[in-house]
Image (cartoon, coloured by chain):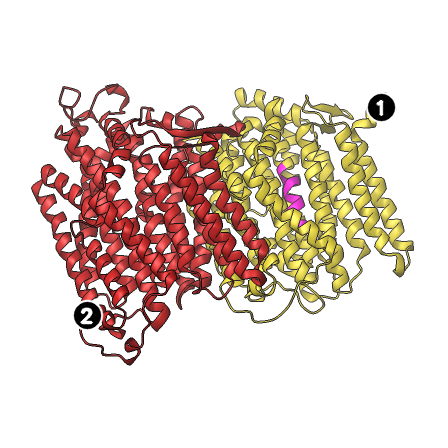
Amino acid sequence: MDSYLLSLLIGLPMLTAVVVLALGEKRAEAAKATALVGSLVVLFLAINLWVGFDVSSANMQYVQKLAWVPAFNIYYHVGVDGIALPLILLTAVISALVLIASWEVIERKVAQYYAAFLVLEGLMIGVFCAMDAMLFYVFFEAMLIPMFIIIGVWGGPRRVYASIKFFLYTFLGSIFMLLGLIYLYQKSGDSFALSEWTALSLTADEQFWLFWAFFAAFAVKIPMFPVHTWLPDAHVEAPTGGSIILAAIMLKIGGYGFVRFSLPITPDAAASYAYILIALSLIAVIYIGLVALVQQDMKKLVAYSSISHMGFVTLGLFLAYQLAVQGRADTAALAIQGGLMQMLSHGFVSAAMFGAIGVLYDRVHSREIADYGGVLTSMPYFGAFAIFFGMANCGLPGTSGFVGEFMVILAAVQANPWIGFAAATALILGAAYTLWLLKRVFLGPITHKHVKTLDDLNPREWVLMGTLAIYVLYFGLFPKPFTDVMQPSVLRLVEQITTSKLPQEAGAQIGSIGGTEISPEGAK
Amino acid sequence: MIQSWSDLMPILPEVAMLIAALTLMLLEAFLSERNRHWLFVCAMASLLGVAFLITIDFSYGAQQRLLDGMLVRDALADVLKLFMLLATAIVFVYARHFFSMRRQFFGNFYVLSLFAVLGMMVLVSAGNLVTVYLGLELMALATYTLVALDRDNGTSTEAAMKYFVLGAIASGLLLYGFSLLFGITGSLDLREINQKLFEIATGDQGKIILMAFALTFIIIGLAFKFGAVPFHMWLPDVYEGAPTAVVAFIASVPKLAALGMAFRLLTEGLHVLQPRWQEMLALLTIGSLLVGNLAALAQYNLKRLMAYSTISHVGFIFLGLLNGGAQGYSAVLFYTIVYALTTAAAFGVIMSFAREGLEFDKIDDFKGLNKRSPWMAFLMLLVMASLAGIPPLVGFWAKLQVIMAAVALGKTFAAVVLIAAICAVIGAFYYLKVIKAMYFDAPESDVLPLATVDVRWVLACNTLVVVVLGVYWAPLAAVCNAVFMHR
């Protein structure tokens, strides 16, 4: 059972999607029910995965390896470690919630809608457990088609533009990664195994090209400034469910890609260019935070806030190099862990924010902030939830938003107080744009007639909001289970990124962890 | 010399094909209107029979040389022939429906197609320059006529004229190259030519320039047959002008033959000149990729779009040919097979909507197809996504192998690889345009597919091949590898 669990998690959603499509539009109710049952079973399996996971080990677990294309040494090779596991759980939870959130909202092509989300769920889980680079790439790219269709078919007025922009941006980024993968395949003696690549020694030149090739793919996906411009469009035009999946999970795939590819495979190049990525992350955090401040459209505001929050992820991941150079392995681990925690937290918080906007949009059919005001009066329960999620979005202690940001800022201050200072301003900006949004939408007198007559949450929305609120609170108050799961894998990652892979310095280490002081520039 | 009848056994498929084509020609002349459908049945039966004759004698073993090396038979020839027959059979199913919907009963279509296939079979088995030319011209003459099949249609005849004139020039250039080659080496046998060229290349420097001349003309001829830039001018007009069934045939099957011809000429005949033809192919690759992809962006006619898409795919085929080794050829074989099957499916979808007075070849015709006919829209989605090279569809694996083969050449051709990669992204845009029209736009008409049950099934299987091969492509990759293993 154990070795099939991951394959079940990948395959079951897709099989369910086929059944849902077969049921078709004429039996839409049955299709929806099937989809929901399928996603709940997946969630149950994901919880099983979590329960059976050995927290003390950094090794890949639930490994299954089957020959896929022997001629090219491509394997169907899946497994999870402490970094992938929470993300798989997140995917399962959010996917089930999205199906519930869309229950009455989607009226056209219901079966196709549900099928697209199920296929997407399977592919995303696949991305998180692929241990073979080609398998990873297949899942990574295949995700584009269902998302493209979700935005394009069920999206807003500018959906065509947004969906094509989304597709081409990501496709262009990943094609460079593909060239990098092919190069590594030949370099490593015809192997696509990630584990072999992390042990492969590469010259500074090779690492330079590979690093930027990976950067092209993952920076677009996460997204980093200045390749973030597809995200606001995609978010604004996507249906609520699409926005939730996009923000909560697909962005995380960019961060996950950095962790799986850039950091361990090209550690020396990553160390050399960490300062660029840190700078870009800070620009994302501050500049995009300012951009969020002036948005008139709620969805756009949250979209920019997502970019800003993802800036913390990349900041944490690449700060680790600065810290490693200074010889602080434990703080480096803290920075990486902070980045990963931020990914998880943002998964729940952004899902909740987009879910809340969806609740309003379904009633008023407007995303303009100016069309609201005093919603708290007519929808007290919903207002309470939304304000709570808003607090989490600006990183209030006790909510999940605090944990990751705090860890990253803590590490940043140790690396360089100025970086820490710059990162901390984001907390202020985040509070500013979130609180101002809340004020304009929920507080104050009711200025529009249609706001007065709004109905409060229905049971379906209660489930969505309630579940997410529980996660956000639990995660904020007691993050230990998550950090415990990650700990061994993160420590191993730190070990990998501090071990130089330059051939002439076999076994040498960046920084003074191994004893002698070798700066990455010197090693080149 | 022919010692006994058993010496002729290896060319039995060709002989059978010739007999079948001639018989069909007679049948076509004498069958009454009512019994015309027997032509289709006989044509399918002959394809099946020839395929059977090939399979019983199939082996991955060493090359057999027949009739003093005029013809050769090896696994490459057999695999190419089998897939040519398969693609032809698929196209025949679509074509029968297409012509009957348009009330055009061109019995000649089957006869001419079979002659074209015979020409291609000779071409991919050629061991001698004369056989190369013989096969090529048999194929070319049959396809010129196929394009002009709808003789009352102005654009059709115009396309046929262009095709014929340009094709004749290309054949002339190719022949000139052959004659120069004969002048240098004194032989028409490809294997002997290769040996002689090797001796000359290591000795007499004066003849090298002459060799380069011969090579240039041969490459031009080859590029014309593939439709590589700058010898692509005929392609968009032919695709737009010819009846869709004929386009489906021309777009898929002759690509396989052209690959066989490229292998026979470039590697069996001119292997010595590899560094030189690599450079030429690199230029053709870049040109085809850029022109094909950029021009396709501006098309609103789907047949014309497919023409430019073909040009860009030829760029990818040439990218694999650059490699010149077993890895490259195996990648290109995979690519071409996949391309032929996928293209056939694309035209199959167009043909299942076409009827009298409606070509159904504008992208606008596909608007809102998902609302009218979700299944057909889904099939077209798969085909387009596969052509765009999106995993896990098989088009991705084809592109992957080709790019891997080119990357293996090292830094020399890194720029070409990079251009190819970027062109793949540009290419994705116009395939997405078709998907966008089908899924995102509101319908402009309520045309429903007229496809009969048999067409629907063949189309579904044809398209599902794209998916199945995408997930489980190991067997086809293994066949393609095995074909070039014993060299």
Check disc 1 and report its element: helix, strand or loop. Answer: helix
Rendered location of residue B313, percent (x, y): 54, 46
Image quadrant in which you'd find residue B77? top right
Residue drawn 39% across the image and 57% down it: A242
Q: Amino acid at mark 1?
A: Ser
Which chain is red in the rendering?
A
Q: Is residue B291 above or below residue A205?
A: below
User: Element at badge 2?
Assistant: loop
A60 vs B156, nearest the viewer: A60
Quadrant for residue B476, please give it.
Answer: top right
Report whether B306 appears left or right of B430.
Answer: right
Q: Nearer the viewer, mark 2 or mark 1?
A: 2
In the picture, which quadrant includes the C terminus of chain A? top left
Q: Start and end of the magenta stretch? A: B249-259
For the residues beneath circles 2 and 1, the answer to whether they share a chain is no
In terms of depth relative to the viewer, which is nearer, B262 or A401? A401
The residue that label 1 is drawn on is: B6
- Residue pointed to by mark 2: A443
Marks 2,1: beta carbons within 8 A: no
x then y, percent, for residue B453: 73, 55
Q: Chain of mark 2?
A: A
Seen at 72% across and 34% down, the residue is B130
Q: Tell me: residue B443, above or below residue B58.
A: below
Q: On the rendered structure, is A272 left or right of B218? A: left
| A127 drawn magenta | no
Q: Is residue A281 left or right of residue A25?
A: left
Residue A405: x and y in percent read 18, 46
Asked if one can make out residue B208 in the rendered structure from this viewpoint, the answer is no
Q: Is residue B59 left or right of residue A358?
A: right
The chain letter for the residue carrying disc 1 is B
